[in-house]
Image: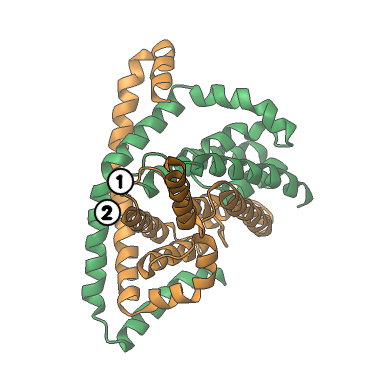
Amino acid sequence: MSVYIIPFFILFVFIFAFFKKVDAYKSFSSGAADALKLILDILPLLATIFIAIQIFTASGLLDIFSVMLSPIFEFFGIPRELSTFIIIKPFSGNGSLVLFNEIVETFGADSYITKTASVIAGSSETIFYTSALYFSKTKIKNLGFALPIAVLTTFFASVLAAFVCRFI
Amino acid sequence: MVVFGVFYMCLSAPESVLEVCLNASASSISMAVVLLGIYMFWMGLLQVAKDAGLIEKLARLMRPFLRFLFGKQSAQTNEYIATNISANLVGAGGAATPAAINAMAELEKEANVNAKTPISRATPPMIMLFILSATAIQLLPTTIISILSSNGATNPEKIIMPTILVSVAATILGVFLVKLFCANIRGQGREREQKQEQKRGSTK
Protein backbone atom coordinates (compact mmCIF):
# COMPACT_ATOMS: atom_id res chain seq x y z
CA MET A 1 0.00 0.00 0.00
CA SER A 2 2.55 2.59 1.14
CA VAL A 3 4.82 1.79 -1.85
CA TYR A 4 2.25 3.60 -3.97
CA ILE A 5 2.31 6.87 -2.03
CA ILE A 6 5.27 8.46 -3.80
CA PRO A 7 4.54 7.29 -7.38
CA PHE A 8 0.95 8.40 -6.91
CA PHE A 9 2.08 11.78 -5.60
CA ILE A 10 4.36 12.31 -8.62
CA LEU A 11 1.55 11.43 -11.00
CA PHE A 12 -0.88 13.63 -9.11
CA VAL A 13 1.42 16.68 -9.24
CA PHE A 14 1.79 16.49 -13.00
CA ILE A 15 -1.89 15.89 -13.66
CA PHE A 16 -2.82 18.75 -11.33
CA ALA A 17 -0.25 21.02 -13.00
CA PHE A 18 -1.67 20.11 -16.41
CA PHE A 19 -5.16 21.16 -15.42
CA LYS A 20 -3.89 24.34 -13.78
CA LYS A 21 -2.09 25.12 -17.07
CA VAL A 22 1.30 25.30 -15.35
CA ASP A 23 4.34 25.00 -17.60
CA ALA A 24 5.68 21.88 -15.86
CA TYR A 25 8.87 21.79 -17.92
CA LYS A 26 9.86 25.32 -16.97
CA SER A 27 8.89 24.95 -13.32
CA PHE A 28 10.73 21.69 -12.94
CA SER A 29 13.96 23.03 -14.39
CA SER A 30 13.82 26.17 -12.28
CA GLY A 31 13.42 23.99 -9.18
CA ALA A 32 16.35 21.86 -10.29
CA ALA A 33 18.44 25.00 -10.80
CA ASP A 34 17.70 25.95 -7.18
CA ALA A 35 18.99 22.54 -6.13
CA LEU A 36 22.30 23.29 -7.82
CA LYS A 37 22.63 26.58 -5.94
CA LEU A 38 21.73 24.87 -2.69
CA ILE A 39 24.35 22.16 -3.12
CA LEU A 40 27.05 24.73 -3.92
CA ASP A 41 26.05 26.59 -0.75
CA ILE A 42 26.30 23.56 1.49
CA LEU A 43 29.26 21.71 -0.08
CA PRO A 44 32.03 23.40 2.00
CA LEU A 45 30.03 22.63 5.10
CA LEU A 46 29.46 19.06 4.01
CA ALA A 47 33.23 18.58 3.66
CA THR A 48 33.82 20.01 7.13
CA ILE A 49 31.29 17.72 8.83
CA PHE A 50 32.52 14.70 6.93
CA ILE A 51 36.12 15.28 8.03
CA ALA A 52 35.14 15.89 11.66
CA ILE A 53 32.97 12.78 11.83
CA GLN A 54 35.53 10.65 10.02
CA ILE A 55 38.25 11.66 12.49
CA PHE A 56 35.94 10.86 15.35
CA THR A 57 35.20 7.35 14.11
CA ALA A 58 38.57 6.44 12.56
CA SER A 59 40.62 7.58 15.55
CA GLY A 60 38.89 5.08 17.77
CA LEU A 61 37.36 7.78 19.98
CA LEU A 62 33.98 6.36 19.09
CA ASP A 63 34.92 2.96 20.46
CA ILE A 64 36.21 4.50 23.70
CA PHE A 65 32.97 6.39 23.96
CA SER A 66 30.84 3.32 23.50
CA VAL A 67 32.83 1.31 26.07
CA MET A 68 32.40 4.16 28.53
CA LEU A 69 28.69 4.55 27.91
CA SER A 70 27.63 0.93 27.68
CA PRO A 71 27.13 0.48 31.47
CA ILE A 72 24.73 3.44 31.40
CA PHE A 73 22.94 1.92 28.42
CA GLU A 74 22.71 -1.43 30.18
CA PHE A 75 21.25 0.23 33.24
CA PHE A 76 18.38 1.45 31.06
CA GLY A 77 17.82 -1.98 29.55
CA ILE A 78 19.69 -1.49 26.27
CA PRO A 79 21.80 -4.54 25.37
CA ARG A 80 25.58 -3.98 25.48
CA GLU A 81 25.94 -5.23 21.90
CA LEU A 82 24.02 -2.20 20.63
CA SER A 83 25.95 0.59 22.32
CA THR A 84 28.33 1.27 19.39
CA PHE A 85 25.40 1.24 16.99
CA ILE A 86 23.43 3.73 19.09
CA ILE A 87 26.41 6.05 19.41
CA ILE A 88 27.34 6.01 15.72
CA LYS A 89 23.76 6.52 14.54
CA PRO A 90 23.59 10.29 15.33
CA PHE A 91 26.89 10.88 13.52
CA SER A 92 26.78 8.86 10.36
CA GLY A 93 23.98 7.33 8.34
CA ASN A 94 26.31 5.18 6.24
CA GLY A 95 28.34 4.06 9.23
CA SER A 96 25.26 2.98 11.11
CA LEU A 97 23.98 1.10 8.07
CA VAL A 98 27.24 -0.86 7.82
CA LEU A 99 27.02 -1.64 11.52
CA PHE A 100 23.38 -2.64 11.18
CA ASN A 101 24.33 -5.15 8.48
CA GLU A 102 26.97 -6.58 10.81
CA ILE A 103 24.46 -6.90 13.62
CA VAL A 104 22.00 -8.73 11.37
CA GLU A 105 24.72 -11.13 10.22
CA THR A 106 26.10 -11.76 13.70
CA PHE A 107 22.89 -12.19 15.65
CA GLY A 108 20.49 -13.39 12.95
CA ALA A 109 17.59 -11.56 11.36
CA ASP A 110 15.02 -12.76 13.90
CA SER A 111 16.95 -12.08 17.11
CA TYR A 112 15.96 -9.61 19.79
CA ILE A 113 19.17 -7.61 19.20
CA THR A 114 18.41 -7.22 15.49
CA LYS A 115 14.79 -6.23 16.10
CA THR A 116 15.82 -3.61 18.61
CA ALA A 117 18.47 -2.26 16.23
CA SER A 118 15.83 -2.09 13.45
CA VAL A 119 13.44 -0.07 15.56
CA ILE A 120 16.22 2.26 16.71
CA ALA A 121 17.38 2.74 13.13
CA GLY A 122 13.86 3.55 11.97
CA SER A 123 13.04 5.96 14.76
CA SER A 124 16.16 8.10 14.95
CA GLU A 125 18.13 10.43 12.73
CA THR A 126 21.74 11.39 12.07
CA ILE A 127 21.19 14.41 14.30
CA PHE A 128 24.68 15.95 14.29
CA TYR A 129 24.86 15.86 10.53
CA THR A 130 21.27 17.06 10.15
CA SER A 131 21.73 19.95 12.57
CA ALA A 132 24.71 21.27 10.61
CA LEU A 133 22.91 20.82 7.30
CA TYR A 134 19.60 22.40 8.35
CA PHE A 135 21.24 25.57 9.64
CA SER A 136 23.71 25.76 6.75
CA LYS A 137 22.05 28.67 4.95
CA THR A 138 21.64 30.72 8.13
CA LYS A 139 24.17 32.58 10.24
CA ILE A 140 23.03 30.87 13.42
CA LYS A 141 26.01 29.96 15.61
CA ASN A 142 24.33 29.00 18.85
CA LEU A 143 21.82 26.16 18.57
CA GLY A 144 20.55 26.64 22.11
CA PHE A 145 18.67 23.62 23.39
CA ALA A 146 18.40 21.99 19.96
CA LEU A 147 21.15 19.40 20.36
CA PRO A 148 20.58 18.47 24.03
CA ILE A 149 16.89 17.87 23.31
CA ALA A 150 17.70 15.87 20.18
CA VAL A 151 20.21 13.71 22.06
CA LEU A 152 17.76 13.15 24.89
CA THR A 153 14.89 12.15 22.61
CA THR A 154 17.20 9.83 20.65
CA PHE A 155 18.29 8.16 23.87
CA PHE A 156 14.69 7.90 25.02
CA ALA A 157 13.77 6.28 21.68
CA SER A 158 16.55 3.70 22.14
CA VAL A 159 15.42 2.81 25.66
CA LEU A 160 11.83 2.53 24.52
CA ALA A 161 12.84 0.41 21.52
CA ALA A 162 14.77 -2.01 23.73
CA PHE A 163 11.70 -2.30 25.96
CA VAL A 164 9.03 -2.64 23.25
CA CYS A 165 11.01 -5.27 21.32
CA ARG A 166 10.83 -7.67 24.25
CA PHE A 167 7.19 -8.21 23.28
CA ILE A 168 7.51 -8.90 19.55
CA MET B 1 36.09 16.83 19.04
CA VAL B 2 38.40 17.17 16.05
CA VAL B 3 41.34 18.17 18.27
CA PHE B 4 40.83 15.19 20.56
CA GLY B 5 40.38 12.91 17.58
CA VAL B 6 43.59 14.02 15.86
CA PHE B 7 45.49 13.95 19.15
CA TYR B 8 44.34 10.43 19.92
CA MET B 9 45.13 9.32 16.40
CA CYS B 10 48.66 10.72 16.66
CA LEU B 11 49.16 8.20 19.44
CA SER B 12 47.41 5.27 17.80
CA ALA B 13 48.03 5.62 14.06
CA PRO B 14 49.89 8.82 13.09
CA GLU B 15 50.53 7.64 9.52
CA SER B 16 46.85 7.59 8.61
CA VAL B 17 45.74 11.01 9.91
CA LEU B 18 46.16 12.83 6.63
CA GLU B 19 44.74 9.93 4.66
CA VAL B 20 41.57 9.87 6.73
CA CYS B 21 41.09 13.63 6.35
CA LEU B 22 41.63 13.63 2.61
CA ASN B 23 39.39 10.62 2.10
CA ALA B 24 36.60 12.24 4.07
CA SER B 25 36.97 15.47 2.15
CA ALA B 26 36.86 13.61 -1.13
CA SER B 27 33.86 11.54 -0.13
CA SER B 28 31.95 14.72 0.72
CA ILE B 29 32.18 15.55 -3.00
CA SER B 30 30.65 12.25 -4.06
CA MET B 31 28.02 12.68 -1.37
CA ALA B 32 27.23 16.14 -2.75
CA VAL B 33 26.88 14.72 -6.26
CA VAL B 34 24.50 12.02 -5.02
CA LEU B 35 22.52 14.61 -3.07
CA LEU B 36 22.47 16.94 -6.08
CA GLY B 37 20.83 14.26 -8.17
CA ILE B 38 18.20 13.60 -5.50
CA TYR B 39 17.56 17.28 -4.76
CA MET B 40 17.28 18.23 -8.43
CA PHE B 41 14.49 15.73 -8.85
CA TRP B 42 12.62 16.62 -5.67
CA MET B 43 13.05 20.36 -5.87
CA GLY B 44 12.00 20.24 -9.51
CA LEU B 45 8.89 18.25 -8.68
CA LEU B 46 8.07 20.45 -5.71
CA GLN B 47 8.45 23.57 -7.83
CA VAL B 48 5.81 22.16 -10.18
CA ALA B 49 3.59 21.39 -7.18
CA LYS B 50 4.16 24.90 -5.88
CA ASP B 51 3.39 26.64 -9.16
CA ALA B 52 0.21 24.61 -9.41
CA GLY B 53 -0.80 25.84 -5.94
CA LEU B 54 -0.61 22.41 -4.32
CA ILE B 55 1.93 23.32 -1.63
CA GLU B 56 -0.20 26.28 -0.61
CA LYS B 57 -3.18 23.97 -0.19
CA LEU B 58 -1.10 21.58 1.88
CA ALA B 59 0.13 24.39 4.12
CA ARG B 60 -3.40 25.68 4.58
CA LEU B 61 -4.57 22.18 5.50
CA MET B 62 -1.86 21.88 8.13
CA ARG B 63 -2.22 25.44 9.42
CA PRO B 64 -3.79 24.75 12.85
CA PHE B 65 -1.15 22.12 13.48
CA LEU B 66 1.69 24.38 12.31
CA ARG B 67 0.36 27.24 14.37
CA PHE B 68 0.41 25.16 17.51
CA LEU B 69 4.00 24.04 16.90
CA PHE B 70 5.60 27.11 15.36
CA GLY B 71 3.42 30.07 16.26
CA LYS B 72 2.42 32.55 13.59
CA GLN B 73 4.71 32.44 10.57
CA SER B 74 4.62 33.82 7.04
CA ALA B 75 2.87 31.86 4.30
CA GLN B 76 6.20 31.14 2.62
CA THR B 77 7.71 29.68 5.81
CA ASN B 78 4.62 27.59 6.47
CA GLU B 79 4.83 26.14 2.97
CA TYR B 80 8.44 25.06 3.50
CA ILE B 81 7.68 23.59 6.92
CA ALA B 82 4.59 21.76 5.62
CA THR B 83 6.68 20.31 2.79
CA ASN B 84 9.38 19.20 5.21
CA ILE B 85 6.99 17.45 7.60
CA SER B 86 4.98 15.69 4.89
CA ALA B 87 8.12 14.58 3.06
CA ASN B 88 9.58 13.16 6.26
CA LEU B 89 6.36 11.26 6.89
CA VAL B 90 6.51 9.39 3.60
CA GLY B 91 10.25 8.84 3.91
CA ALA B 92 11.29 11.18 1.10
CA GLY B 93 14.34 12.63 2.82
CA GLY B 94 15.52 14.14 -0.45
CA ALA B 95 12.49 16.42 -0.47
CA ALA B 96 12.52 17.09 3.28
CA THR B 97 16.06 18.41 3.67
CA PRO B 98 16.06 21.21 1.08
CA ALA B 99 12.65 22.35 2.37
CA ALA B 100 14.03 22.48 5.91
CA ILE B 101 17.14 24.40 4.85
CA ASN B 102 14.95 26.99 3.13
CA ALA B 103 12.54 27.10 6.07
CA MET B 104 15.43 27.82 8.46
CA ALA B 105 16.63 30.65 6.21
CA GLU B 106 13.11 32.12 6.14
CA LEU B 107 12.75 31.83 9.91
CA GLU B 108 16.07 33.64 10.33
CA LYS B 109 14.99 36.39 7.96
CA GLU B 110 11.76 36.92 9.90
CA ALA B 111 13.51 36.90 13.26
CA ASN B 112 15.97 39.49 11.97
CA VAL B 113 13.16 41.86 11.02
CA ASN B 114 12.31 42.34 14.70
CA ALA B 115 15.86 42.27 16.00
CA LYS B 116 18.24 45.20 16.03
CA THR B 117 21.35 43.13 15.46
CA PRO B 118 21.30 39.95 13.34
CA ILE B 119 20.47 37.00 15.55
CA SER B 120 23.05 34.28 16.12
CA ARG B 121 21.01 32.07 18.42
CA ALA B 122 18.47 29.53 17.17
CA THR B 123 14.89 30.64 17.82
CA PRO B 124 12.25 28.27 19.28
CA PRO B 125 10.54 27.66 15.89
CA MET B 126 13.92 26.69 14.41
CA ILE B 127 14.59 24.28 17.24
CA MET B 128 11.09 22.85 16.87
CA LEU B 129 11.61 22.20 13.16
CA PHE B 130 14.94 20.52 13.84
CA ILE B 131 13.56 18.32 16.63
CA LEU B 132 10.62 17.20 14.47
CA SER B 133 13.07 15.97 11.85
CA ALA B 134 15.46 14.53 14.42
CA THR B 135 12.79 12.29 15.91
CA ALA B 136 11.79 11.24 12.39
CA ILE B 137 8.30 9.80 12.28
CA GLN B 138 8.56 7.50 9.30
CA LEU B 139 5.61 5.44 8.17
CA LEU B 140 7.67 2.82 6.38
CA PRO B 141 11.35 2.12 7.20
CA THR B 142 12.04 0.71 3.72
CA THR B 143 15.84 0.35 3.92
CA ILE B 144 15.76 -1.55 7.20
CA ILE B 145 12.99 -3.88 6.04
CA SER B 146 14.81 -4.71 2.83
CA ILE B 147 18.01 -5.54 4.75
CA LEU B 148 16.05 -7.73 7.16
CA SER B 149 14.23 -9.64 4.45
CA SER B 150 17.37 -10.17 2.38
CA ASN B 151 18.90 -11.76 5.48
CA GLY B 152 16.03 -14.19 5.83
CA ALA B 153 13.89 -12.62 8.52
CA THR B 154 10.64 -14.56 8.88
CA ASN B 155 8.46 -11.53 9.37
CA PRO B 156 10.29 -8.23 8.75
CA GLU B 157 7.04 -6.21 8.72
CA LYS B 158 6.77 -6.91 12.43
CA ILE B 159 9.09 -4.01 13.19
CA ILE B 160 6.85 -1.41 11.53
CA MET B 161 4.40 -0.97 14.42
CA PRO B 162 7.06 -0.71 17.14
CA THR B 163 9.04 1.73 14.97
CA ILE B 164 6.05 4.02 14.52
CA LEU B 165 5.15 3.73 18.19
CA VAL B 166 8.66 4.59 19.35
CA SER B 167 9.12 7.50 16.96
CA VAL B 168 5.72 8.98 17.80
CA ALA B 169 6.57 8.75 21.50
CA ALA B 170 9.97 10.37 20.88
CA THR B 171 8.39 13.14 18.81
CA ILE B 172 5.84 13.91 21.52
CA LEU B 173 8.61 14.06 24.10
CA GLY B 174 10.67 16.29 21.78
CA VAL B 175 7.79 18.71 21.16
CA PHE B 176 7.07 18.81 24.87
CA LEU B 177 10.71 19.57 25.74
CA VAL B 178 10.97 22.30 23.11
CA LYS B 179 7.80 23.92 24.44
CA LEU B 180 9.09 23.60 27.98
CA PHE B 181 12.65 24.83 27.55
CA CYS B 182 12.50 27.26 24.68
CA ALA B 183 10.53 30.32 25.76
CA ASN B 184 6.87 30.24 24.88
CA ILE B 185 6.80 30.59 21.11
CA ARG B 186 3.63 32.62 20.86
CA GLY B 187 4.41 34.92 23.77
CA GLN B 188 7.98 35.52 22.68
CA GLY B 189 7.51 38.99 21.21
CA ARG B 190 5.43 40.07 24.17
CA GLU B 191 8.02 38.79 26.60
CA ARG B 192 10.77 40.78 24.92
CA GLU B 193 8.66 43.92 25.10
CA GLN B 194 8.01 43.34 28.77
CA LYS B 195 11.71 42.92 29.44
CA GLN B 196 12.50 46.15 27.65
CA GLU B 197 9.81 47.89 29.64
CA GLN B 198 11.23 46.55 32.86
CA LYS B 199 14.66 47.84 31.86
CA ARG B 200 13.23 51.23 31.07
CA GLY B 201 11.41 51.19 34.40
CA SER B 202 14.52 50.33 36.35
CA THR B 203 16.64 53.06 34.74
CA LYS B 204 14.07 55.62 35.75
Q: Quick one: which residue is furthest to the right in this view?
A: A167
Q: Is residue A108 above or below residue A59?
A: below
Same chain for the residues under marks 2 and 1 in the image: no
Q: Secondary structure at mark 1?
A: loop
Q: Is residue B173 above or below residue B20?
A: below
Chain ID, mark 1: B
From this viewpoint, is residue B18 visible?
yes
Query: Disc 2 designates what residue?
Result: A38
Q: Could you tell me the amino acid type at mark 2?
A: Leu
Q: Is residue A59 left or right of residue B22?
A: right
Question: Dot 2 surroundings within 10 Å: few (below 14), some, or many (20 or more)?
Answer: some
Pinpoint residue A131: horizontal percent, then vertical percent.
Answer: 43, 44
Quadrant where the image shows the N terminus of chain B: top left
Query: Disc 1 designates what residue?
Result: B117
Pinpoint residue A152: horizontal percent, then vertical percent.
Answer: 60, 41
| Numbered disc in front, either 2 or 1 | 1
Say which residue appears at 49% left-offset and 72% top-offset.
B63
Q: Is residue A8 above or below residue B28?
A: below
Q: Secondary structure at mark 2?
A: helix
Q: Which picture quadrant has residue A94?
A: top left
The chain displayed green equals A
What color was chain B assigned in the picture? orange
Q: Is residue B71 left or right of residue A160?
A: left
Q: CA distance from mark 2 to mark 1?
A: 26 Å
Q: Nearer the viewer, residue B79 or A124?
A: B79
Chain ID, mark 2: A
Q: Could you tell me the amino acid type at mark 1?
A: Thr
Quadrant where the image shows the C terminus of chain B: top left
Say which residue appears at 31% left-offset and 44% top-offset.
A139
Q: Is residue B29 left or right of residue B130?
A: left
